């Protein structure tokens, strides 16, 4: 039993610690097939088709999203349930593996169709109590 408690404590402490090289950097493009069927996909403003900077999964009951930073694929869970109704977006996500990290998605709609909305905005990776680790101008779509 004591070994189990030590294991839980070690896991909790690891989740509080950022990766060794967690310094200011850039959000990196990743292959959206890692996410599955997507709902929202945002690329860098000057993307050349090398992957997405942010993606959410279609019909995910947890509204999980993903970004990549310093080669690590990060899973995100929103603090409040996002409303992708075609209006402006301002969503803060918690990074699952790093308790003091947040990702903020701020975007305004550019155009809308029957089942999708095109957005542009900013994606920011933050560490609680410090400056942002990475910020990127983004453009992308939500919908089917």
Image (spheres, grey):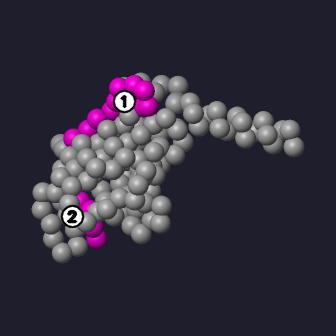
> Which residue is denoted by mark 2 in the rendering?
86
Magenta part, dominant SS: strand
Which residue is the extreme one toward the bottom? 114
Q: Position of residue 22 (x, y in %)?
A: 46, 27
> Which residue is denoted by mark 1 in the rendering?
133
Q: Residue at x 42, y 31 (%)?
A: 127
Which residue is the extreme one toward the front? 80
Which residue is the extreme one toward the left? 111
Quick one: label 1, few (<14), some, or many (20+) residues within 10 Å?
some
Q: Nearer the viewer, residue 44 or 49?
A: 44
143 w.r.t. 30: above or below: below
Which range of residues does the magenta coloring cover? 127-144
Q: Position of residue 105 (x, y in %)?
A: 30, 47
Q: Position of residue 23 (x, y in %)?
A: 41, 24
In terms of secondary structure, where does tag 1 sit? strand
The answer to whether residue 50 is magenta is: no
Residue 35 appearing in the image: no
50 w.r.t. 32: above or below: above
Q: Is 90 positioned to the left or the right of 98 in the image? A: left
Q: In front of the other: label 1 or label 2?
A: 2
Q: Earlier in the sequence, mark 1 or mark 2?
A: 2
Q: Quadrant of residue 15?
A: top right
Q: Residue at x 31, y 62 (%)?
A: 83
30 w.r.t. 129: above or below: below
Residue 39 appearing in the image: yes
92 w.r.t. 34: above or below: above
Q: Quadrant of residue 109?
A: bottom left
Q: Is 41 positioned to the left or the right of 8 in the image? A: left
Quick one: label 2, few (<14), some, or many (20+) residues within 10 Å?
some
In terms of secondary structure, where does tag 2 sit? loop
The answer to whether residue 129 is magenta is: yes
């Amino acid at each position: 039993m004591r070994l189990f408690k030590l294991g839980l404590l070690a896991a909790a402490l690891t989740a509080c610690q950022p990766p060794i090289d967690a310094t200011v950097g850039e959000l990196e493009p990743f292959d959206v097939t890692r996410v599955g069927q997507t709902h929202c996909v945002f690329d860098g403003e000057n993307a050349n088709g090398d992957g997405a900077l942010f993606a959410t999964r279609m019909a995910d009951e947890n509204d999980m999203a993903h970004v990549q930073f310093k080669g690590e694929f990060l899973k995100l869970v929103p603090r409040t349930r996002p409303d992708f109704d075609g209006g402006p977006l301002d969503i803060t996500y918690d990074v699952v593996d790093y308790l003091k990290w947040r990702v903020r998605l701020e975007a305004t709609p550019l155009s809308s169709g029957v089942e999708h909305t095109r957005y542009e905005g900013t994606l920011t990776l933050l560490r609680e109590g410090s400056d942002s680790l990475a910020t990127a101008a983004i453009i992308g779509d939500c919908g089917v």
